[in-house]
Amino acid sequence: MLSTMRCRLSVFLLSTVLASTSTSTSTNVTFTNPVIPGSNPDPSCIFADDLSGGTFLCVTSSFLSFPGMPIHASKDLINWRLTGHVFNRPEQYPSFGNITNQQFGVYAPTLRYHDGVFYVTTTIFGKSEFPYLDNVVFHTTDPFDDASWGLPVSTGGMTYDNSLFWDKDSNMYSHGASGYGITQCSLQKDPYGQLEDCPTIWNGTGGVAPEGPHMYLINGTYYLMIAEGGDAPKAPTKHHESIARSDSINGPFVPNPSNPLISSVNTTEYITGPGHADIFQDAEGNWWGMALATRSGSEFETFPMGRETVLFPVSWDANGWPVFSQVRGVMSGPLPPRNREAPGIGPMLDDSDYEDFKPNSTIPKHFAYWRLPVPEDYTVSPPSRPNTLRLTPSVHNLTSNTKDGPDLSRTFISRRQTDTLFTYSVDISLENINQTSQAEAGVFLFVTQEQHVSLSLHSQDGTSSLRFRLESKNSNTSSPYSVQPLSSHWTKFPIRFEIRAINITHFTFSAGVVDNPYSVPLQTIATAPGSAISGGYTGAFVGAFATTNGEEKRGWAAYLSRWRYLPQGQYLGDGQWVYRDV
């Protein structure tokens, strides 16, 4: 399918002009969603007008992937650079490695900027003792320097989806979800200790799970915006955003008669379940919103990238209520001038991967692990094998789960799937595999330990084979498992593994011998449905792994080279595509 595509960028025009009450002279231009694609849910965004000449920053949830809480930066709201991670070293939260529940980890951070300091507050689920969650605050004066994000301070809170707010008298508050309503807690400033008085200030409009609160003080009025309807994997289409306001930070809060602000309930929109939103102004005074949403359509069966971040314009009606535009794949609004010069040193989100692990290089900033990695298991360009990434195999494999105990470190290197259509490939060679009876290394599409698809070279007692495996908790998806014996020719050379999204719903897994680097014929081993890795709170990661499958003896290694991720197309719904030429 992709081989027939021409070099093109599909451009769409919308007939509806979005209303705006700002005084900006900006003209409406077309843009496409999601603006931060892949597994990047629960966005919290700000505009810092004194940062690098004015910069938009967003933080998103990361759950059990590490490093956690990615920070993206943009000059124009469309072109985003990964600038770093708030949670970037084990000493910031050592017990993170012991979290076993697949839906736990780092939840719903909020990013705020106050008096020259950037703050991120978040909830970490999965403590081994009661309470099983921890409300923490990180801060820095330089969001582009990972090392400047210090150790978090626990506020002692027992809510989730927490958000910070400074009143006009500089009093500091934390707003969180209790499961039944939104609580408001006063915080002391140094350290950030939660005070005892934490009243519930709003129960929402009646939708289940009032959560994701954000408080705003706009023209002397307090606005409390929340998500409702639940964003559980089985019922996200009821997810929506609501708002209320008050003359006092303590309430009472009066709901907007036009709630919900955004919703896909009773629609056939391809982008579903918008909510958990944040709003902010740009340099021209225009209002914008960012929210999570899922590209799945109303059938909600195939959405391997999970919950992503979408952008929409916000206006204000004559009664002082915000008006959100319906979130779609193609929209328009008074965007800032296009500018790809986002500050920071990480990759742009739409960049391809051409990684050759050259000497003196480091693992790219956008690569991710599952839980805390063991650093010595990843070596870039070892002296004996330059231009490779050496993976020392882990005892645990992709499926090892809670029954196997805590501290489930695994040799796992990945990047987010950020495109509907893509081709990922990497060359893998194994060294000294005869020293173990259960050597295995290969590639994967991974959502959790309960949902992943892999193709690997497996060596058992001197016999090598290609092994394809699909693990899925989806009841309507079978779990195929196949083994293809290999000739000795395959084991003398590196093997090129490839994962390719061939359409909206399916992936192919292929392999071939790299005996001639200029021509590597690939054999398609299996096809996997995207529905198998859809569901849960995270989206798919694509990458490589190495494991002994439970054996303690690790006298061998896997070597990765020629890592490629090539974006080829985004599906926006309603038959609309943006294709990439690579």
Image (cartoon, rainbow, N blue to C red):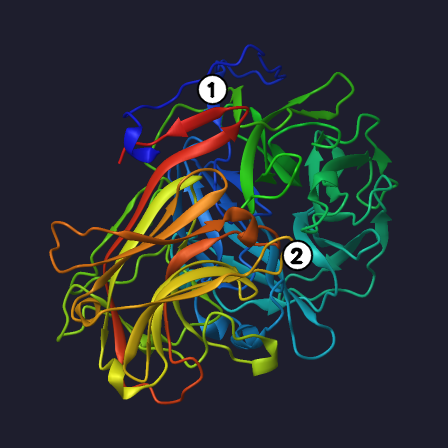
- Looking at the picture, how far across and down is residue 452, in whole percent? 50, 60
Q: Nearer the viewer, residue 312 or 406?
A: 406
**SS at mark 1 in the image:** strand
Kind of residue at disc 2: Ser
Q: Residue at x 49, y 53 (%)?
A: 540
- The residue sitting at the bottom extreme is 553
Q: Quadrant of the N terminus?
A: top left
Q: Can residue 171 be seen here?
A: yes
- Looking at the picture, how far across and down is residue 44, in whole percent? 58, 45
- The residue sitting at the top extreme is 15
Q: Is residue 3 above or below residue 147?
A: above
Sequence-wise first label, 1 or 2: 1
Q: Quadrant of the C terminus?
A: top left
Q: Nearer the viewer, residue 375 or 555?
A: 555
Q: Residue at x 78, y 53 (%)?
A: 184
For residue 54, the mark is: none
Q: Between marks 1 and 2, how big is the CA–CA gap?
A: 40 Å
Q: Residues within 10 Å of mark 2 (few under 14, many from 20)?
A: few
Quarter occupied by residue 349: top left
Q: Nearer the viewer, residue 305 or 134?
A: 305
- Pointer 2: what residue? 475
- Looking at the picture, how far across and down is residue 27, in whole percent? 48, 13
Q: Can residue 51 be seen here?
A: no
Q: How many marks?
A: 2
Q: Residue at x 62, y 58 (%)?
A: 107
Judge from the rendering whether residue 449 lies leftward or rightward of residue 11; answer left or right: right
Judge from the rendering whether residue 483 lies leftward or rightward of residue 323; answer left or right: left
- Pointer 1: what residue? 30
Q: Residues within 10 Å of mark 1 (few under 14, many from 20)?
A: some
Kind of residue at disc 1: Thr
